[in-house]
Image: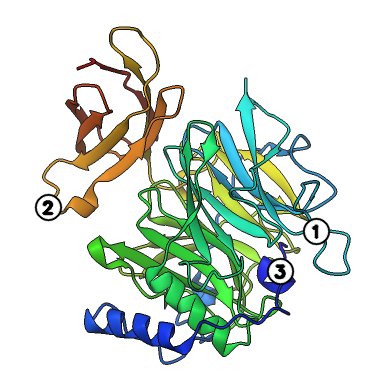
Amino acid sequence: MNISSDTLFAWERRILPTKNVLALWLIWMTFGMISLPKSNFAQPSTLDRAKIPTLKFKGNVTITRLNQINTSFQEANLSLTPDGKRMYFLSDRGGQAWSRRPDSTERFDGDIWTSERINGEWQSAQCLDATVNTGRGEDEPNIMPDGQTVIFQSWQPGWQDNGGPYYSATLKGNMWEKPLGLGGGINLFFTQMRKQTQDLYGTDGAAFSANGKLFVVACGPDYDGAMDLYFSRKVGKAGWLYCQKLDISTDGNERSVFLAADGKTLYFASDGLGGFGGLDIFKATLSDDGKVTNVVNIGEPFNTKANDYGFVVSAKGDEAYFVRNGDIYMAKLTSAMDALKPLPVSILTGTVRNKTTGAPVQAKIVLRPVNASLDSEADELSSHADGTYSAVLNVGKTYRQIISAPGFKEVERTISVPASKQSSALQIDITLAPM
């Protein structure tokens, strides 16, 4: 199981000045956006674990160890683009100019790596550059649907003051821009928890919804102890709300969370809900207000007597990835029951080009559900340097797509996504006319 950078650098004591904590507190309480929980530590779940069903898988599952990506070091906490062509993950293999061994073990500080899938095969991984990675240990990458933004964790020096420990980095052309802290209630929560635990408070897996407005994290007072699941929502100008504990948390250990492309299906690992032994992987439905329902144990062959965790499902629902003994495995879900999969979505892809020359264009793309009442319901993304773009849309909905780029005339169109019981792909190429 992944050892977080929290543990690696627990010997460094960095406490946010009292005046900064008080300022953040007053801002959030003035606007009535948060209420601090009575207890920030584990409380028994109200779920009756004896009543949690276990999925009975029928048919064969092809499981493959991804030797092209795995090393003798640890790989974990992976994230996929909706088109399934790129993977981001943590590895403590080192080998970089900034790499160091922060303790007596043979492993290095963690970095974020990426692998591209070409002709169906995952390629050797590449480490993200020093704009994102440092010698402080970076972890828990979440690649957004457009493939242009990665959100990750870093306990880098000064994280309390610059909006950490979760950061967002955007790809411009082929270069990552300087990461920006998410700030708000996420920053305040971790600042307070680290202070209360003498910098021992740790995390082991975080997930962001496809629209970037829902955050779930496994965290606790000590990395080696029991953890709980917390969540936060991003609300308009107020930003990220203070993290609140999910009612699925038990007096046991919850780890390794993943939010599927539908933004509602939650996968997580727990040893407090019964099962096969050790950490088991569970599937549940998460509502916007943090209520967790429809909890099921996903069963064999994914759960065993060992610790099983790190379960990630592709946007199409046809593949799953998970971690076992520090290595990444892939499983084909072609014949898997629907109960194992998230709700269907439509994966929108395409290319933006210059109408006159045919050259690719890096454009801003806004997708807004028709009849949306709030600007916050719109999703904003960008096309890559090669003009390609991708997004996740809900089935059975109609969207307005607005495409703009400096020096080009804006294009607006309507996209209707038919209702479906299966995830589907939708390709819409765009041409922009120069002004």
Q: Nearer the viewer, mark 2 or mark 3?
A: 2
Q: Secondary structure beneath disc 3?
A: loop
Q: Secondary structure at mark 2?
A: loop
Q: Quadrant of residue 185?
A: bottom left
Q: Check residue 277 in the rendering and tell me which mark sits there, or answer none.
A: 3
Residue type marked 2: Ser
The mark found on residue 100 in the picture is: 1
Disc 1 packing (10 Å; few <14; some 14–19; many ≥20): some
Precedes in sequence: disc 3 or disc 1: 1
Residue 28, horizontal then vertical, whole percent: 30, 79
Would residue 319 be found to the left or right of residue 376 on screen? right
Mark nearer the N terminus (2 vs 1): 1
Q: Look at the numbered discs 3 and 1 and tell me whether their residues touch, using CB distance below 8 Å.
A: no
Question: Residue farthest to the top?
Answer: 357
Q: Distance from label 2 to label 3 (Cα)?
A: 47 Å
Q: Is residue 112 above or below residue 175?
A: below
Vertical placement of residue 337 versus 400, above or below: below
Image height of 59 relative to 278, above or below? above
Query: How far apart, in angstroms, are the residues tagged by discs 3 and 1?
Result: 35 Å
> Which residue type carries mark 3?
Gly
- Element carrying mark 1: loop
Q: Between tags 3 and 1, which lies in front?
A: 1
Report the front residue among 120 and 356. Answer: 356
Task: Pinpoint residue 430: horizontal percent, then vertical percent.
Answer: 29, 19
Contact between marks 2 and 3 (CB within 8 A): the answer is no
User: Where residue 302 appears, x then y in whole percent?
Assistant: 66, 52
Q: Earlier in the sequence, mark 2 or mark 3?
A: 3
Kindly identify the amino acid type of the residue bearing the numbered disc 1.
Arg
Q: Quadrant of the C terminus?
A: top left
Residue 373 bears which disc, if any?
Answer: 2
Q: Nearer the viewer, mark 2 or mark 1?
A: 1
Residue at 56% over, 61% down: 153
